[in-house]
Amino acid sequence: MGQELPPQYDPKAFETDLYRRWEERGYFRAHPAEAAQRDPYVIVIPPPNVTAVLHMGHGLNNTIQDVLVRWRRMQGRLALWVPGTDHAGIATQNVVEKQLAEEGRTRFDLGREAFEARVWEWVRHTEPRILGQLKAIGCSCDWTRTAFTLDERLSRAVREVFVRLHEKGLIYRGRYIINWCPRCLTALSNEEAEGRETDGQLWRLRYPFPAGTDAPGLPTLPDGRPYLVVATTRPETMLGDAAVAVHPSDGRYAAVAGAEVELPLTGRRIPVIGDEWADPEFGSGAVKVTPAHDPNDFEVGRRHELPALDIFTEEAITNENAPEGFRGLDRFEAREKVVRALRAQGLLEGVDAHTHSVPHCYRCDTVVEPRLSLQWFVRMGPLAEPALAASREERVRFTPRRWKKVYEHWLENIRDWCISRQLWWGHRIPVWYCACGREIVAREDPDACPACGSTALERDPDVLDTWFSSWLWPFSTLGWPDDTDDLRVFYPTHTLSTAPEILFFWVARMIMAGLEFRGEEPFSDVYLHATVRDPLGRKMSKSLGNGIDPLEVVDLYGADALRYTVVAAAGVGTDVTLDPDDLEASFSPGRNFANKLWNMGRFALMNLEGRDIPPVDDVRDELELADRWILSRLGAATGDATRYLEEFRFHDYASTVYRFLWGEAADRYIELVKPRLDGEGADASRAAALATLVHVLDTGLRLLHPIMPFVTEALWLRLPVPGQRPESLVVAAWPRAEARDDDAELQLRALMALVGSVRTARSEYNVPPARAVDVHLTDVSGPLTAALEAEPRALERLARARHAGDGTRAAGAHEVAGAHDVLADGTGVFVPLAGVIDLDRERARLAAELERIGGQREAAEARLANESFTSRAPADVVERERGKAASFREQEDKLARKLGALR
RNA sequence: GGUCGCGUAGCUCAGUUGGUUAGAGCGCACGGUUCACAUCCGUGAGGUCGUAGGUUCGAGUCCUACCGCGACCACCA
């Protein structure tokens, strides 16, 4: 049987078949009826955008979710992982528009219906590929529940929510300053406008008063007119100014309050108003007011009933509200032209360099234009309160903890949510307008106006923000608004694992929606996973070209290797660094680990051939020291692994299992028991070793299965585990931590320290591998004595050494490095190596080395003593030289001590 | 401007409530044809724990300031 397995693990030979088997057997399905017996555990997937195939960030996040789901499933929970995808309104529309652009067309050439059809075509192409990727990395989703934010079921939920919020007065339509993307031609929410630090300029403009105005204390133009100085980062907006504001208590301007200035270039006169918004400390203390193009100015304008003059078209081209000569210009051309014109008229006071945050469209990176616009909004205050309480009362917990504060801060300063988008791809706003003025908001498309009976209704052309469907995901995927079994059994869900950058976009809003529409927070734990970066610390992205394709990794190294790598790298609060140009460095450790397991399995199977393996409990009395030791270590690993999973400490979980299986089970235990398996000694001893080995492998594979489901399953299915067991690791029981055996651990630790000492000595003194050495021990402690008796072959097997007696210090013997380690362990060992070391040769070698280092040190010191070197060489070179000299001195000390020990 | 995080070996990171000689993986060097695995085994080198103070018998760990990097938020024109 063992011989059938090749010496290398080949993921390709197993992964696809195993996954198909799992799916066919329905292991990933969760039936609500079973909830009576098994406690549900539910995760909803953060639905990937259908814009493109998955990247490494998805690989990381979905592996983490799969680890959690598989672990809980093994614990006997009714585990459900709901998969699906997001229509990603603006992002997907952009992708398809880009494709059209390559064909030289725009969406307007196609028309709305044909364009939507075109996007659907793209979705039908992308969605299956995304789902296929998730399967390729082993995600154990319940695929019968696959959802899409734009499918009929979820669209009903969206509509229901819109209508309900509208009925409650929490959705309203109004003209406000919103963030407008002149490239996407749509409004954006505050969150979708990302501020970017930009080196810009601050222009100081002069607004003159009419000739003859008496303005004591103000500067004057050469023609005698007094003027005000206002500062702006967007000079072109002055074309839409409605006033200049000064602080009411600002004495400098008391005389001109209520007067009018002549707005340059426009021929308009605008008032000087008193408003607390003006900060006397900033610049001149006077600020221009442009109600149609700045949110603050909009508020000032409202307070003073100023006109809001919109000077731009949707494309940010100056419109007819701009004066003659300034119409039809792109906003940045307009800026230049305005500045030139002002300068020509002597109305430009100056320009300063100015670094400030400029909002950019999060989808196309165009500078966003604040703009007065008629849009739909959600009133967020009432929704935020309960969401805030959920966090404060720890009904929703964040991992890492620090995100709690970020979340709460956002909610405490919540602003209304602009939800209408001037796009074609998305959920159409369920509002109809009648010529009679009636506005109809309805769950079902209306046939006629309830007020006037007219059938000529016009539907609002806009669609909803894509997050307006995402925020319902935890319950819309379970059937809401219908009262379904799924909803009753699986809501609320338990863990939400996602990227920190969508904490506000998605997580916070889901909590608000869950509380509002279900009366319960949608999940109890939020795990914010690491960001995947390249070695330069840059976030992986398609545009930078530094991404890694998960499928390529699966193809080269296997899904298990990918999963192991990202889970092992997922320390709490740190990012994951992967090198797209060196996949080998990033993923070979995972592949090697899978191969190590494979060979542990091969080894076991070769030795098990044809034998009946008893349960470990049946051979308790026959267990030897090594057996008791590895079982104790297994207990420790099981306890640690479980605790780490509970605490979302994935890195610690992964390394616990890794160290146990490789460092202890393979490197130590298997090496220790080889003689017993080879047929030396009694049958009972062999039986005990085999039973232990099988138990350790069985349990170890269970512990590792959530991370590396494929290789563990491939081996487990072949492992002759005694007794009854399920047909797959997927549904096997998660191990319980067994009791520790402190005596066994202490003894084995002493033995291993001795082995280490001997190995160190052998290596340092170049003892040929084939040559056995005698080891003399003095002051041997109880644990070590016991260990040497219990494992008489250990020294020979692991260190090619023979225990040549206690208490005698052979002539010419000396202490070797490492012996102190044993002493520190409380086991009191002295390890002379008699007769195997050529002390003369060793002394000569050390002396030569000492001389060489001494020469280097002297050279360095000579350089440092040379004044022309220290005064002329660059400081860092001198410093380095100093460091070198010091390090040589240290090395010399070390060598001298060693040499002294040999005399 | 506010809030938060990070600086430990060449690289990526662990370091519990302060406690002997600061760890792991990778990389590097040296040595290995033992019949599970060279995708392996063994050994080793390499660290002023960002800087400067402070608290303490004792600080990588706690406090203060500073330097550097990063994130998020914010209407300062």
Image (spheres, coloured by chain):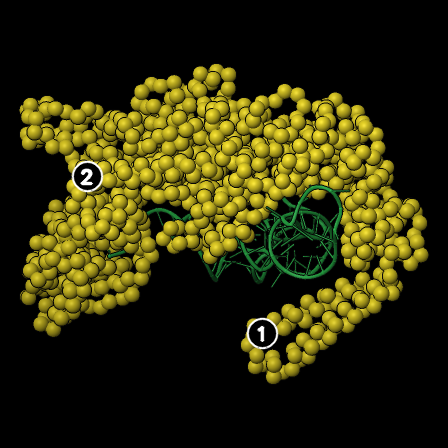
Chain colours: A yellow, B green
Is residue A708 shown left or right of residue A266?
right
Looking at the image, residue A521 lies above or below residue A137:
above
Identity of the residue furthest to the front in this view = A4
Q: Nearer the viewer, mark 2 or mark 1?
A: 2
**Chain letter belonging to callout 1:** A
Label 2 sits on what residue type? Ala
Kindly identify which residue carries mark 1.
A877
How far, Cα to Cα, is label 2 from label 1?
69 Å
Q: Toward which corner of the image does residue A810 lie, by quadrant?
A: bottom right
| x 38%, y 39%: residue | A129
Identity of the residue furthest to the bottom in this view = A868
**What percent of the width, then of the height, locates residue A459?**
14, 32
Is residue A14 shown left or right of residue A426?
right
**What percent of the width, then of the height, locates residue A493?**
43, 27
Q: Toward which corner of the image does residue A595 lie, by quadrant?
A: top right
Do tags 2 and 1 sit on the same chain?
A: yes
Q: Toward which corner of the image does residue A165 lie, by quadrant?
A: top left
| x 56%, y 72%: residue | A876
Label 1 sits on what residue type? Val
| x 52%, y 36%: residue | A15
The residue tagged with tag 1: helix, strand or loop? helix
Q: Which mark is residue A114?
A: 2
Mark 1 and mark 2 in contact (Cβ < 8 Å)? no
The residue tagged with tag 2: helix, strand or loop? helix
Whether residue A505 is visible here, answered yes or no, is no
Whether residue A796 is visible here, answered yes or no, is yes
**What percent of the width, then of the height, locates residue A366?**
26, 53
Q: Nearer the viewer, residue B28 or A720?
A: A720
**What percent of the width, then of the height, locates residue A854?**
74, 73
The answer to which of marks 2 and 1 sits earlier in the sequence is 2
Q: Nearer the viewer, residue A285 or A622?
A: A622
Looking at the image, residue A230 lies above or below residue A495:
below
